[in-house]
Amino acid sequence: MTHKVFIDGAAGTTGLEIAERLAGRSEFSLIKLDDTQRKDAAARREALNEADVAILCLPDDAAREAVDLLDPASGTRVIDASSAHRTADGWCYGFPELVGSDRVADARRVSNPGCYPTGFLGLVAPLVKAGLLPADWPFTVNAVSGYSGGGKALIGRYEDGDAPAFRAYGYDLAHKHLPEMKTHAGLEHPVLFAPAVVPAYRGMLVEVPLHLGAMSTDPRADALRDALAEFYAGSKVVSVYRGDTPAELLLETKAQPDDGMELFVFGNAGGWNARLVARLDNLGKGASGAAVQNLNLMCGLPETAGLHLPNA
Ligand SMILES: NC(=O)C1=CN([C@@H]2O[C@H](COP(=O)(O)OP(=O)(O)OC[C@H]3O[C@@H](n4cnc5c(N)ncnc54)[C@H](OP(=O)(O)O)[C@@H]3O)[C@@H](O)[C@H]2O)C=CC1
Ligand SMILES: CC(=O)N[C@@H](CCC(=O)OP(=O)(O)O)C(=O)O
């Protein structure tokens, strides 16, 4: 069976990387709109309703509009890469390792996680669920992202303009990723989120520093690492680092696409402090790779087919 897929926003950063991952896969045929039609509501409506699966790679408002363009009787299933539906009723949060592959496979509406939340939730959600980290803890997230995380506009600023060496932002403390981090980790308080951008195209480090000794659950770093390793034991996408503590974690300026996510747990000798770190590609598990993983599941195909993974 060939699945008809329409990428709405196919000319954008996330859309192009999804098409690249689907190229050459005979299980899918892509519905394409040319440059004169790609923002035309009538053409998009037709393509959206013709598709078996529509993947929305659009700004939030345009993603909501795309959902409105769907005929209520349409059988089209949706994967939304935007942040429009990540905590919305009736949408499955498209993080199969956390919500269960079966739920994604059966869903009609799947909201792809944000790139930063993928790192944060990948680290924290299983540990809160296991009772190792308290749900009422005031979590902090420090993160750096490659500039493709900001889509075409930020890519233009870095590649055509005067690229800053380091760009910290989010000082309004109201980043759009806050609701999904709180909701899907099952937290009582919003996280304190400090994002930044570095002059590399792709890649991110998402770090959660923890004062373990001040927690009611009094966990140890080794126990957190063991719990994460057990939780992701069956995953081909998420892995937990078990080696010696590296002196540094690096993002490469010319990194290749990578759809995996590696989790690290570092702790000090006294057991008071820990740093949880996720290393991922914002366009891999943070966006396009995750969308293709979800698409595979929704179409009953091997979960990691077409992904940029060593053993896929
Ligand atoms: N980049 C990343 O790492 C990640 C992105 N996302 C999310 O994915 C979505 C897409 O992001 P990204 O690919 O980076 O963004 P881009 O800006 O690179 O691409 C968005 C595309 O949508 C097109 N577009 C805008 N409005 C409409 C419309 N009304 N109808 C049809 N097409 C439209 C744009 O057209 P034009 O080319 O003319 O501007 C552009 O091609 C966003 O919601 C983003 O937040 C999620 C996780 C990570
Ligand atoms: C570097 C950069 O600008 N990143 C984006 C997030 C990218 C992403 O995850 O997209 P969603 O917002 O759809 O989740 C930001 O901070 O707004």
Image: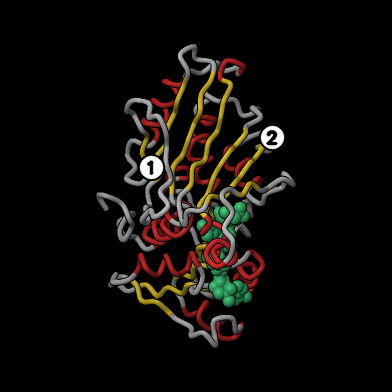
Would you say 89 lies left or right of 291 here? right
Residue 72 percent coordinates (x, y): 59, 73
Give the class, few, some or many, for how many residues have Cα within 10 Å of label 1's Cα (few <14, many ≥20): many
Q: Can residue 12 be seen in this view?
A: yes
Quadrant containing the N terminus is: bottom left
Report the residue marked by disc 2: 189
Instruction: Relative to 101, say whether 193 is above or below.
Output: above
Q: Looking at the image, which is closer to me, 129 or 116?
A: 116
Residue type for callout 2? His
Name the outermost residue toward the front. Answer: 162
Instruction: Report the colour scheme.
Output: secondary structure
The residue depicted at 48 percent of the width and 40 percent of the height is: 122
Q: Say which mark, if any, is on residue 252.
A: none
Indicate if the residue with disc 2 has its beta carbon within 8 Å of ligand 2. no
Dot 2 or dot 1: first in sequence order is 2
Residue 251, above or below 225 = below
Q: Is mark 1 on a helix, strand or loop?
A: strand
Q: Quadrant of ligand 2?
A: bottom right
Closest to the observer, 47 or 208: 208
The residue under label 1 is which amino acid type? Answer: Val
Across and down, in percent, residue 254 comes to 39, 55
Write down the residue under mark 1: 238
